[in-house]
Image (spheres, coloured by chain):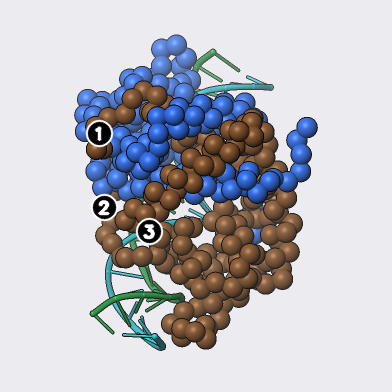
Chain colours: A brown, B blue, C cyan, D green
Amino acid sequence: MTGQGLEPQQLGAYFAFAEAASLLQHHVEQHLRAEGGLSYVQFQLLARLAEARSLTMTQLADGVVYSRSGLTYQAGLLEQAGLITRGPSVDDERATLVTITEEGLALVRRILPGHVQVVRRLLVDPLSNDDVRHLGDIMSRVRDHMRAQPPRSAAPRRRRAPRSV
Amino acid sequence: MTGQGLEPQQLGAYFAFAEAASLLQHHVEQHLRAEGGLSYVQFQLLARLAEARSLTMTQLADGVVYSRSGLTYQAGLLEQAGLITRGPSVDDERATLVTITEEGLALVRRILPGHVQVVRRLLVDPLSNDDVRHLGDIMSRVRDHMRAQPPRSAAPRRRRAPRSV
DNA sequence: TATTGTTATACTCTATAACTATA
DNA sequence: TATAGTTATAGAGTATAACAATA
């Protein structure tokens, strides 16, 4: 049964979680921009491609971007910068296959160590090994639970409520 | 000693944390916009004011917004919408005192239950009481550790690296 | 001199709707 | 018909720099 409110402890956990995530993201973004001229989204896209080498737009979008056109926009920037290329897919001629270039790989390799160091310094250092294990376990479950929820990245096309403020 | 890389387990915890935070934020934003026509930032500002009634711009900015002008912009919107008022401070005539209106309070009261329910459904429900306690503890420590790091909200005024992509 | 806040401006990013093409 | 991707467009948001006023 999904109850009503939240206990103070639960609310506190939520607030701490939200602020920690916001702070970490802000620090990481500053580092990525200063070090590689990339936004967080751009870095995530490149990091995925660094592992997979080639992905379709839809595969690339999943979990990173919440609209199709948003990915097209970012892919356009990354292609202009020579970090990726886009070409047709042989399996499915509707699809666009995105491939990381040597320059893209080089950029990821150059930035990644510093990125990891920021994460270590801000997130890992203040925690014990046990904490980190717990955090990974808890967050994996929460993530999987949310992934199973309705709205996903490039899936269905829905409306949007207007901003009233 | 702050070491070099991160173990797979540590990296996994970071990825799960980052994705869970992104997903939660996205769901919460959708709810806030649909239910109250507010962005997440706007809701955070109002929620703070609902508790404190009155805060200076600097106090209000802390932990929510990372630039002064960004807060001025948001405060302008909230004031236009009749949710807050801005006036001079008696203690410090440089300061602007932001006060939430009855309408602002009513809006927060109307939205908060649904907001809490989203957080419960997505973050709290898949966790045990023990998990939640752990999460709160871990995140509080991480948050405090990051708060103690150099860059803070409306503090010093620094440069920004150009976007190269 | 340092701090508080605003303004002007430029830019990044996101998302909806309409469209093309292939499955 | 459904899916993959692009384009056009409009709007929201952010941040830097320059500025005015008070401490």
Residue located beneath label 2 in the image: A161
Marks 3 and 1, how far apart in space?
Answer: 25 Å
Give the amino acid at mark 3: Arg
Residue B13 sits above or below residue A46 on the image? above
What residue is at 65 percent from the left and 64 percent from the top?
A50
Residue located beneath label 3 in the image: A152
Give the amino acid at mark 1: Gly
Give the amino acid at mark 2: Ala
How many other residues sit within 10 Å of disc 2, few (<14), some (14-19) or many (≥20)?
A: few
Marks 2 and 1, how far apart in space?
Answer: 27 Å
Label 1: which secondary element? loop
The chain letter under disc 3 is: A
Q: Position of residue D1 (x, y in %)?
A: 23, 80
What residue is at 36 percent from the left and 23 percent from the top?
A8
Asked if labels 2 and 3 touch by Cβ distance under 8 angstroms, the answer is no
Q: Quadrant of the C terminus of chain A?
A: top left
In this rendering, position of residue B146 left or right of residue B28: right
Total residue callouts: 3
Among the two numbered marks 3 and 1 on one chain, the one whose residue lies closer to the N terminus = 1
The chain letter under disc 2 is: A
Residue located beneath label 1 in the image: A3
- The answer to which of B112 and A8 lies nearer the viewer is A8
Label 3: which secondary element? loop
> Of circles 2 and 1, which is in front?
1
Residue A125 lies in quadrant:
top right
- Residue B68 visible? The answer is no
